[in-house]
Image (tube, rainbow, N blue to C red):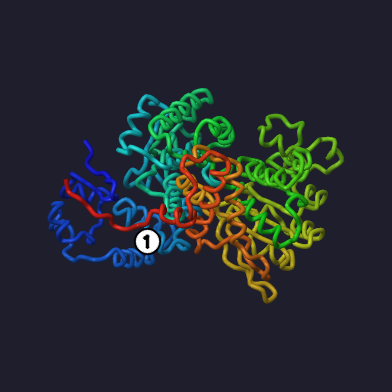
């Protein structure tokens, strides 16, 4: 029996009464309930007598937020608001998005993930266990959702730069979903977060008596695949229109899952495709600033994992669109992993790494670095003279002064993108990069950094946050009712972001500011929807005024009318 649902006019209809009304964050509005609603819903006397507006509630909670002593306390407060009153949470988040995005998402979310089992207060999302695959359908149906636009799923195998954190990974899925809603206007009532609990290899979690996940190591590849197939098949059957967003999937599985399912269902991996698109956007903005075509850049990627190879694929795809052959495009990339420069004779390379691998004969006389047992970053930079240097290694300080100065000695406007997060894992800090290059570097980072003042110029540091693209991609999919996410749609997202930047002034930012995230998502969504129609993967027909159409689809945090049943 349904107790709470939305009717065709966007009104809540509910059979809930009394404290059950206050316990549902979708319905609860606390002191914003009118006196008539309090009477009809049986909550008279269960909240203080004052009747306040949503804006007044936002002001009160923001004052509480400002009094919190640190970021984790702020995260806990916002989580409590989210669990109590969803509309209030999103109105607050949207009102203070630049300030709160780092709290509900990266970098503060990493600490919340680590302390998940100890700070646990209330469940959110759907928890699926590899030990009980027979409960997948029952668990998804327990949400009460008849149809969905978006599912954010993680196995928590590679959380940000902090690795495997088991069931705590639910926090990254919930955080990602919050950004979809706040930045992209995705309807939270048509979205869910899913934790795919396949165990954990982190011994400290297995030894922790308070750990709340499956208390065993991660399962074998065969068992993992059976579980994922069961999950994907069930999702496809129950929610055929939903985009399945893979988040922080373990390194050995992320690319494999994307390749396995992308041509069979509506799916998207933010760590591969979103990271690639936002880095392409930064590179396209740098192209405007340097005057050098992307096809003519030499690109070194330090960190040839999921994110790094995803970036390489996206940049290479754009080079192909610009007229290079596959062989010519591959020749513009040098990638390094923990063993040094990736070469074709290495064992155990993924297909994505092979696309970046160099011919061993080409580098036979290059100096090897004893620390990595292969050819290190310093030697690659000295030999290649890269024009773009991208970091996805999670190795703090890897872009040393010597390496950066070597790069800058041969390039007029070096493009340096230390993408690793959280902040303490960044390959370099913008202030150092600006100083080491005498202000010539074009810099964007994965974590937020403040502006840098150097030689009378203020340099605004763009954050290459995936939030610039993935909310708009999701909204564009909803607007077009796309049944696939194509490479053209990802490229369209990157170009839309790059077109929003003006790189002509000294110190100008490579990427749009977080303050304009909803406007950025609107532009991205329109571009993605248009690309979906061009690619023939849209179920909905083109809208006469695309921007107006997309804007009207964006969910707004307002209290809906309530109809007691």
- Where residue 278 appears, as percent x and y from the top left, is 59, 51
Give left or right: position of 303 versus 53. Answer: right
Any part of residue 204 in sight: no
Residue behind mark 1: 92
Give left or right: position of 475 versus 64. Answer: right
Any part of residue 233 in sight: yes
Q: Residue furthest front?
A: 544
Disc 1 is placed on an element classified as: helix
- Where residue 72 appears, as percent x and y from the top left, is 42, 56
Please say if 313 is above or below 285: above
Snapshot quadrant of residue 90: bottom left
- Callout 1: 10 Å neighbours few (<14), some, many (20+)? many
Please say if 290 is above or below 84: below
Residue at 69 percent across and 59 percent down: it is 286
Give left or right: position of 88 versus 520. Answer: left
**Near-viewer residue (339 or 388):** 388
Residue at 29 percent across and 50 percent down: it is 10
Give left or right: position of 189 versus 151. Answer: left
- Where residue 432 appears, as percent x and y from the top left, is 67, 63
- Where residue 518 appears, as percent x and y from the top left, is 47, 59
Residue at 68 percent across and 36 percent down: it is 353
Could you tell me which quadrant the N terminus lies in?
Answer: top left
Could you tell me which quadrant the C terminus lies in?
Answer: top left
Please say if 216 is above or below 333: above
Residue at 83 percent across and 49 percent down: it is 383
Snapshot quadrant of residue 360: top right
Total labels: the figure holds 1
């Amino acid at each position: 029996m349904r107790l709470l649902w939305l009717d065709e006019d966007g009104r809540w209809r509910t059979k809930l009464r009394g404290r059950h009304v206050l316990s549902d964050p979708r319905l609860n509005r606390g002191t914003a309930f009118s006196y008539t609603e309090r009477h009809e819903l049986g909550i008279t006397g269960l909240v203080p007598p004052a009747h306040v507006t949503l804006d007044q509630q936002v002001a009160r909670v923001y004052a509480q937020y400002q009094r919190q002593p640190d970021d984790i306390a702020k995260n806990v407060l916002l989580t409590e608001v989210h669990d109590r009153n969803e509309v209030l949470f999103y109105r607050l988040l949207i009102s203070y998005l630049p300030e709160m995005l780092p709290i509900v998402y990266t970098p503060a979310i990493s600490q919340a993930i680590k302390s998940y089992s100890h700070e646990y207060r209330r469940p959110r999302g759907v928890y699926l266990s590899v030990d009980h695959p027979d409960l997948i359908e029952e668990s998804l149906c327990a949400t009460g959702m008849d149809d969905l636009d978006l599912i954010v799923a993680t196995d928590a195998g590679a959380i940000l730069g902090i690795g495997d954190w088991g069931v705590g990974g639910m926090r990254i899925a919930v955080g990602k979903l919050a950004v979809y809603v706040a930045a992209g206007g995705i309807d939270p009532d048509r979205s869910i977060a899913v934790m795919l609990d396949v165990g954990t290899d982190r011994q400290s979690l297995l030894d922790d008596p308070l750990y709340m996940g499956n208390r065993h190591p991660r399962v074998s590849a065969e068992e993992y695949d059976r579980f994922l197939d069961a999950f994907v098949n069930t999702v496809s059957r129950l929610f055929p229109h939903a985009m399945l967003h893979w988040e922080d999937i373990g390194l050995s599985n992320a690319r494999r899952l994307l390749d396995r399912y992308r041509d069979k269902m509506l799916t998207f991996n933010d760590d591969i495709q979103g990271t690639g698109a936002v880095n392409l956007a930064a590179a396209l903005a740098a192209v405007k600033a340097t005057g050098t075509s992307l096809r003519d850049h030499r690109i070194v990627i330090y960190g040839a994992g999921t994110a790094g190879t995803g970036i390489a694929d996206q940049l290479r795809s754009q080079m192909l669109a610009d007229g290079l052959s596959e062989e010519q495009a591959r020749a513009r990339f040098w990638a390094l992993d923990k063993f040094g420069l990736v070469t074709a004779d290495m064992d155990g390379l993924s297909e994505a790494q092979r696309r970046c691998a160099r011919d061993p004969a080409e580098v036979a006389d290059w100096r090897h670095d004893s620390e990595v047992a292969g050819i290190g970053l310093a030697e690659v930079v000295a030999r290649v003279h890269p024009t773009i240097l991208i970091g996805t290694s999670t190795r703090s300080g890897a872009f040393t002064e010597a390496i950066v100065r070597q790069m800058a000695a041969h390039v007029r406007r070096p493009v340096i993108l230390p993408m690793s997060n959280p902040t303490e894992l960044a390959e370099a800090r913008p202030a150092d990069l600006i100083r080491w290059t005498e202000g010539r570097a074009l810099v964007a980072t994965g974590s937020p950094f403040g502006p840098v003042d150097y030689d009378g110029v203020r340099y605004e540091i763009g954050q290459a946050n995936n939030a610039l693209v993935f909310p708009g991609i999701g909204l564009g999919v909803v607007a077009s009712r796309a049944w696939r996410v194509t490479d053209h749609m990802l490229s369209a997202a990157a170009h839309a972001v790059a077109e929003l930047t003006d790189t002509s002034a000294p110190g100008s930012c490579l990427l749009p500011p977080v303050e304009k995230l909803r406007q950025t998502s609107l532009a991205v969504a329109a571009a993605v929807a248009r690309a979906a129609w061009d690619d023939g993967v849209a179920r909905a027909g083109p809208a006469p005024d695309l921007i107006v159409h997309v804007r009207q689809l964006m969910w707004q945090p307002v209290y809906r009318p309530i109809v007691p049943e």
